[in-house]
Image (cartoon, rainbow, N blue to C red):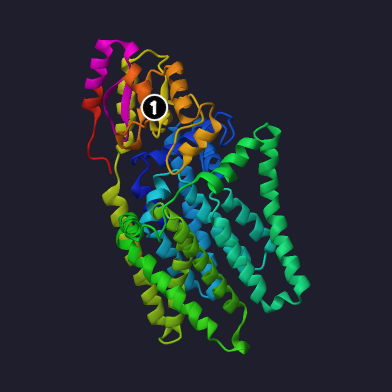
Amino acid sequence: MRLATVLYVLHGFDGYLSRDLGDYAYGGQQVAEGVPPYVAVVNRAGPLAHLIPGVGALLAQWVGVDQVVGMRVFLMLFAVASIGVLYVLGRDLFRSRLAGVAAAATLMGCQGFIAYASDGPREKTSMILFLLCAMLATVHRRWLTAGFFIALSTLCWQPVFFVAIAGVVVTIALDRSGGRLTERLRALLRVAVGGLVPSAVTVGAYAAVGALGIFMDDFVLINARYTQQTSLITSPGAALDMLAAGYGPSLAFFLAGLVAITVLCLRALRRPAEQRDAQWVDLLAVGAILVAGLVWSLKAFNGFPDAFIMLPPAALGIGGLVVALAERVPLRTVVIATAAWTIATTAVGATYAISTRNDTLDDQRASVQAVMDVLPEDARILSVEAPQPLVLTGQRNLSRYQQFGNGLIDYVDDTWPGGSEGYGRWVGRRDPTLIALGNGGVVPSWLAPTIDRGYQRVGTTIGWDWYASKDVGPQTLQTLRKVVKDTYKPEVP
């Protein structure tokens, strides 16, 4: 865990604040201000995706440091804890400390995992910790604990429920110690009870503040009815490109681990009945988690972070290789091989961490501040696919709506009076001083009349375009163009 901490600190906490990271950071800031998740911003992920960064933002306030950096440091602790839990999981699953070391080293040096370990906040960092805790509880047949952590992981990112529950169901179904059918049903009931605790607390909290409808919309309805996503089936080439870009050389670790765990599970299936012990059950449960993760990815795969649900099986696959190696060669050779693997993964991870460390967040912060310095103190920003300037100024958006892609525009059409066009007219009536537009600089059709009537584009900054109200006057518009141009850094990662 110490090595993981050093590695992630090397990557730094001032990397580029993207749209998605900005969305979770914005939600976290609002939580720190006392606004429940979803109430300040529409979001498809679970409420913990905003609540956990909110704790980081609140802690940052208390110690007097930048909120974004505070959220990133706090989420890094989740990443470091994941490495520790994975070590214990690999050790207990394979009954081998060396297997635990190899599994933990694999995840520690994974490029995609490092990226969000210190450059978040991102919901999948906390999700993977809770998934690993659920897997560890399953290995030890702690059903209440397993259900509790499955619920926590689901409250971070909903699809992980199907992955985690697959491992639990397979374990309960195959475990000989489970006894009769009634005892297996009791185990499932314990899982359900454990999961109901955080779930009931969440639902009760939203009901208490009168926001249960908002919770149901964001947590369930939007995902079930409105979300449109790519998948490994519809866009296999794009998915492979995203994996290659997100994981870099460490993609080889990921793929090797997936192959290894698949082979180990197939070997287990061929094992004679008299050799089917608890370890056999646990191994097949990991295989079930992998299969469930692949099935979900065939349905929806929007970027390399979606592969996080398959990182634990892949890492455990490398741990299983260590055990298989120990059956064939002397222990000293296995120790040397494990040490070499740890050095190799650390070297790959450190190379990525150091070579991609950057201070783009400082550039974004300076650019936003330069723009705001030109305008009156009461200048307001409206975000359209660009929450970053809200985060960097501490402002609250004029509405809950900030993202409109992947089907969310249909949700706006169904829930806002007059639909998206009505929302565009509403924006014009609210007359924000600035509109921060992401979306690759493309003005959406529902916003175009408002932009054409009352705003002028003053330039592109690091991650979004600025549109300023014509009411600020020609001289201020000219000054804004110069400021935006002077602070623009084209080398955005």
| Residue extent of the magenta highlight | 456-482
Which element carries disc 1, helix, strand or loop?
loop
Q: Report the residue marked by disc 1.
A: 447
Q: Is residue 47 visible?
A: no
Residue 63 in the image, given as x and y percentages of width and height? 50, 32
Asked if residue 190 shows in the view, the reply is yes
x, y (%) of residue 378? 42, 14
In front here: 209 or 60?
209
Q: Dividing the image into 4 quarters, which one contains the C terminus?
A: top left
> Which of the 4 quarters of the picture holds residue 37?
top right
Residue 366: where, in percent of width, then height?
A: 31, 28
Residue 457 forms part of the magenta stretch: yes
Residue 362 highlighted magenta (yes or no): no
331 sits to left or right of 364: right
Q: Whole-percent x and y of residue 26?
A: 47, 34
- Horizontally, residue 170 falls left or right of residue 448, namely right
Taking 105 as reference, is 334 above or below it?
Answer: below
